[in-house]
Image (cartoon, rainbow, N blue to C red):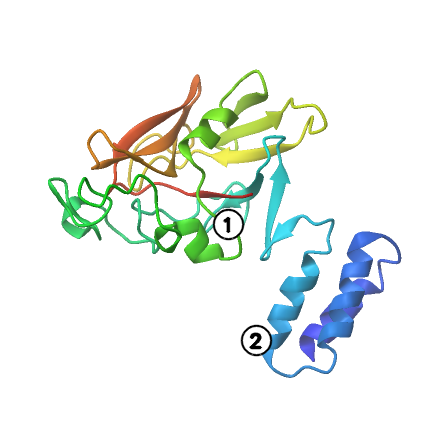
């Protein structure tokens, strides 16, 4: 009842546009429902009517590369928040990161994503974006991060006050679409607000104990390789 009343109150201030339509549809869908799980599912389904700008309840921006980029990190509630930190292949955040507590073994004895199994990329069951946000969300591939670093198609602007980088598209038809990439360093690391590290879904198969990341700093944005156990942030994409 409280949900219906609250949405109804908001809807009285909106008479046109996609937002009013979506709210009206939500009201119709949940008016006779009493189970809060069903109510929540109805709300999430109808929120996607807001200009088609969400997937499974999470907003995205199209940057002209064929992908839908989430507007915030996994675990964040605003674009400026760092969100949660994950080891590569783990789907739950934790309070410390080392080879001693890494899910898939140690530097020299990896139990999955190793030379024996030959896996070069994460299974979706081990993808932090898919596990936490569900739907069609996933972590970016190395080449997808690299494409976003291409200054021919995208402008990167450092914002010291917000502690991160605004990436703006120059691709025809998507000009001025942008996402914010907060610089959260690694878990417990220095350079917060200046340097950012984001996992990709792909391995550095020359060693297997490294995976590819996006590294960003005031004068550099590029892909690199990093130890899999490290706690880095995650940005989700969808095809």
Q: Earlier in the sequence, mark 1 or mark 2?
A: 2
Tell which of 103 and 205 is nearer to you: 205
Q: Under tag 2, what secondary structure? A: helix
- The residue at the far right in this view is 15
Q: Quadrant of residue 172?
A: top right
Mark 2, Cα crowd under 10 Å, few <14 / some 14-19 / many 20+, is few
Can the viewer see residue 215?
yes
For image coordinates 46% across by 49% down, the residue present is: 74
Can the viewer see residue 159?
no
Image height check: is 110 above or below 144?
below
- The residue to which callout 1 is attached is 137
Residue 124 image label: none
Quadrant of image for the N terminus: bottom right
Q: Under tag 1, what secondary structure? A: loop
Q: Which percent across, then down, holds residue 225?
A: 29, 29
For image coordinates 20% across by 50% down, the residue present is: 104
Q: Quadrant of residue 168?
A: top right
For image coordinates 33% across by 47% down, the residue present is: 86
Left or right placement of residue 230 versus residue 19 in this view: left
Q: Which percent across, then down, holds residue 188?
A: 28, 41
Left or right placement of residue 74 versus residue 169 in this view: left
For image coordinates 57% across by 75% down, the residue present is: 37
Residue 37 image label: 2
Tell which of 177 and 3 is nearer to you: 177
């Amino acid at each position: 009842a409280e949900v219906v009343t609250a949405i109804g109150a908001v809807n009285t201030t909106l008479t046109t546009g996609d937002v009013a339509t979506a709210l009206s549809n939500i009201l119709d869908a949940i008016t006779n429902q009493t189970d809060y799980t069903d109510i929540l599912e109805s709300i999430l389904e109808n929120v996607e009517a807001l200009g088609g700008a969400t997937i499974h309840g999470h907003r995205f921006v199209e940057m002209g590369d064929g992908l839908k980029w989430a507007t915030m990190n996994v675990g964040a509630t605003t674009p400026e928040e760092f969100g949660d930190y994950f080891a590569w292949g783990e789907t739950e955040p934790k309070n410390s990161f080392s080879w001693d507590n890494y899910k898939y073994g140690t530097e020299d004895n990896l139990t999955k994503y190793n030379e024996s199994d030959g896996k070069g990329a994460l299974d979706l069951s081990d993808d932090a974006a898919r596990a936490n946000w569900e739907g069609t969300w996933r972590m970016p591939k190395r080449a997808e991060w690299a494409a976003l670093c291409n200054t021919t198609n995208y402008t990167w602007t450092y914002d010291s006050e917000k502690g991160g980088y605004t990436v703006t598209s120059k691709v025809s038809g998507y000009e001025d679409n942008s996402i914010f990439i907060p610089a959260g360093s690694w878990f417990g690391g220095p350079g917060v607000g200046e340097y950012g590290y984001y996992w990709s879904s792909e391995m550095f198969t020359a060693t297997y104990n490294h995976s590819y990341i996006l590294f960003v700093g005031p004068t550099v944005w590029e892909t690199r390789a990093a130890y899999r156990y490290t706690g880095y942030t995650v940005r989700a994409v969808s095809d």
